[in-house]
Image (spheres, rainbow, N blue to C red):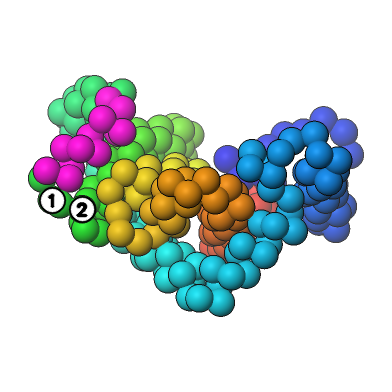
Amino acid sequence: MAAGRRRRIGAPLSRRGYLITSVTTFAVLLAIWTLVTVSGLVPPIFLPSPGAVLTALGEQLQNGELAADAAASVYRITVGFLAATVMAVPLGILMATFNRVEAAVEPFADFVRYMPVVAFVPMTILWVGIGDLQKFVIIWLGTFFQQLLMVTADVGRVPRSLIDLGETLGMSNAKILRRIVLPAAAPRIWDTLRITLGWAWTWLVVAELVAATSGLGYRITLAQRFLATDIIIGYVLVLGVLGLVTDQLMRWAGRRAFAYEQVKR
């Protein structure tokens, strides 16, 4: 659920106050990190200083490896996540609408989603090799089944009173689905996509850590062999920044696409 739609205790926080509080949190964590490394409490091999990490990232940026790795990972996450989404959303809507579809699909989805995706990594390498297709498959496996069940739940939470109103007005089932159910469920479905996008990033890195010749996860694995902890932490931070940016972009798009939901609440 989007942050702006939760019920909270106390006075509401302005957008400026929210931003200041968020930035302060990052600043405090950065200060603690700097203090720990400068004081020598932790050896640099275990925790390099922020300056060392920035220097390593600067070198990676200058030689072009950082941009190439980020581009490869963004491409894989885009294709893999979209593949899962275009399959999970319509099927989830059908599961929430038709009992027979739900009976046919939900038990199998529940069965598969408890299988560890990591265990499929060596199998996917045997099936499709170590190219981008293998990364797409891992992202799909880790995202699709969770999305499917969450979208089904999102559509199922549409108030029955709205559906009854459509039936009272003589609307057909298809029109009720198109004019009532989908607009009511769309904000929740979008929030589900935003949440599962974060999971997709995790599965991408898992795939790149095990079998890859490019990407952010691959670079982390390569740095691990040489104990280059400054590059490891730097790339982990880059992953966090990319994830935060995509999350905030989706949140921004959701607020504008579903402005009617904001007004209603």
Residue at the image point whose x is 40% and y is 35% from the top: 150
Q: Which residue is mark 1?
A: 128
251 with respect to 155 (left or right): right
Q: Position of residue 244 (x, y in %)?
A: 60, 54
Q: Nearer the viewer, residue 48 or 23?
A: 48
Residue 77 or 143: which is nearer the viewer? 77
Q: Quadrant of residue 52?
A: bottom right
Which mark, by number, is residue 115? none
- Tag on residue 130? 2
Quadrant of residue 155 within the rendered picture: top left
Tell me: residue 216, above or below residue 63.
Answer: above
Q: Amino acid at mark 1?
A: Val
Q: How many angstroms separate mark 1 from mark 2 (CA)? A: 7 Å
Q: Which residues are magenta?
A: 115-126
Q: What element does badge 2 sit on?
A: loop
Alpha-carbon neighbours of circle 2 within 10 Å: few (<14), some, or many (≥20)?
some
Q: Residue at x 48, y 49 (%)?
A: 226
